[in-house]
Image (cartoon, rainbow, N blue to C red):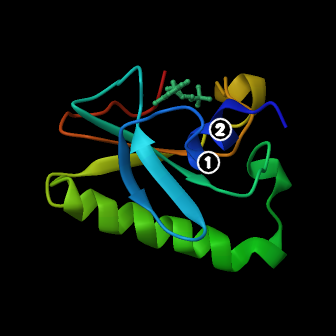
Amino acid sequence: MNCIFCKIASGEIPSKKLFEDELLFAFYDIQPQAPVHFLIIPKQHFSSLNDISKEHSGLAGHLLATAAELAKKTGIDQSGYRVVLNTNDDGGQSVPHLHAHVLGKRKFLWPPG
Ligand code: DGP
């Protein structure tokens, strides 16, 4: 499959890797929107959150637990951070491989723009 994030997860396209296990790959965003900005992706290809159903609850929970672990590792757990899953056009998704943004080390607005 010609998917840029599948290629990043496999190492075919280089990235600044933060974490990897059998299910997930985490790397720093190439266009950071905050002083700390990394992405967590499942190694398995899902186009978006719309592809996730309750049969994937284990993976989804593992992704959230990994976000918390990596927030601690990158030193943003206490100051605070935001986890974002942009989905399809209105959600602002530009890469069609499910990814969670983790952003920190600045104050974020609510409601989002
Ligand atoms: P989204 O707009 O939610 O689909 O986020 C996609 C993010 O992926 C965007 O913030 C930029 C980032 N990105 C796109 N291509 C690459 C790449 O080749 N390497 C890295 N590290 N990040 C990328």
* Residue 35 drawn at (x, y percent): 21, 30
Q: Is residue 83 left or right of residue 18?
A: right
Choose between 2 and 51: the one closer to the eye. 2
Disc 1: CA contacts within 10 A as few (<14), some (14-19) or many (>=20): few
Do the numbered discs 2 and 1 sit on residues whose CB atoms are within 8 Å?
yes
Q: Quadrant of residue 53?
A: bottom right
Disc 2 marks which residue? Answer: 7
The amino acid sitting under disc 2 is: Lys
Q: CA distance from mark 2 to mark 1?
A: 5 Å
Give the residue at mark 1: 10
Give the image location of residue 77, x and y in percent.
Answer: 21, 60
Label for residue 71?
A: none
Q: Is residue 15 left or right of residue 85?
A: left
- What residue is rendered at 58% in x and 71% in y? 22
Image quarter (top left, top right, bottom left or bottom right) of the N terminus: top right
Q: 70 left or right of 12? A: left
